Amino acid sequence: MKKLARLAMIAGAAALFATGAMAQTLEKTKIQLGVGGKALLYYLPLTIAEKKGFFKEKGLDVEISDFAGGAKSLQALVGGSVDVVTGAYEHTIRMQSKGQDIRAVV
């Protein structure tokens, strides 16, 4: 549960910065982000944000790990090798049905 709360705070802080809201300090600035198939059109916003330096601009050091599909990125999240994943909302539903407390953040 602590990990989920930490993930929510990281994502929330990133969202605040992305919308221009001011925050005093981030709890964590280095984030391991997992994605399943980064080259897919589905993840174009992530690639644009990375290439244009939007994460760094907001004080975040985001390391993106590209996995062979959403299932592998979720395994990395559950296993603790990434802090957060980007993917389809349906993954949260499937993981919850398996007893994993995974939540979507927008």
Image (spheres, rainbow, N blue to C red):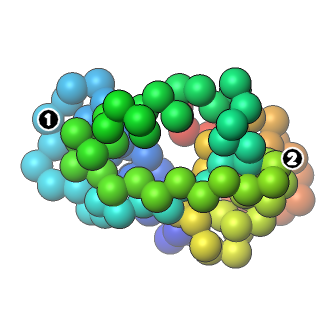
Residue 15 at x, y percent in the picture: 37, 35
Residue 62 at x, y percent in the picture: 41, 54
User: In the image, which disc is placed on residue 67?
Assistant: none
Horizontal relation, residue 59 to residue 46: left or right: left
Q: Residue at x 69, y 37 (%)?
A: 39
Type of amino acid under label 1: Met
Give the mark nearer the N terminus: 2 vs 1.
1
The quarter of the rendered structure image containing the N terminus is: bottom right
Could you tell me which secondary element the residue under label 1 belongs to? loop
Q: Callout 1: 10 Å neighbours few (<14), some, many (20+)? A: few
| Closest to the observer, 1 or 58 | 58
Please tell me whether residue 95 is drawn above or below residue 80 in the rendered image.
above
| Closest to the observer, 57 or 85 | 57
| Closest to the observer, 13 or 57 | 57
Residue 105 at x, y percent in the picture: 54, 38
Q: Distance between the residues labelled 2 and 1?
A: 35 Å
Horizontal relation, residue 20 to residue 81: left or right: left
Q: Quadrant of residue 31?
A: bottom left
> Seen from this angle, which residue lies furthest left?
24
Q: Callout 2: 10 Å neighbours few (<14), some, many (20+)? A: few
Residue 10 at x, y percent in the picture: 39, 53
Q: Which residue is drawn at 30% across and 51% down?
A: 60
* C-beta proximity under 8 Å, tags 2 and 1: no
Q: In which quarter of the image is residue 98?
A: bottom right
Residue 76 visible here: yes
Q: Residue at x 70, y 75 (%)?
A: 79
Q: Quadrant of residue 28?
A: bottom left
Residue 96 visible here: no
Q: Residue beneath label 1, please? A: 22
User: In the image, which disc is placed on residue 94?
Assistant: 2
Type of amino acid under label 2: Arg
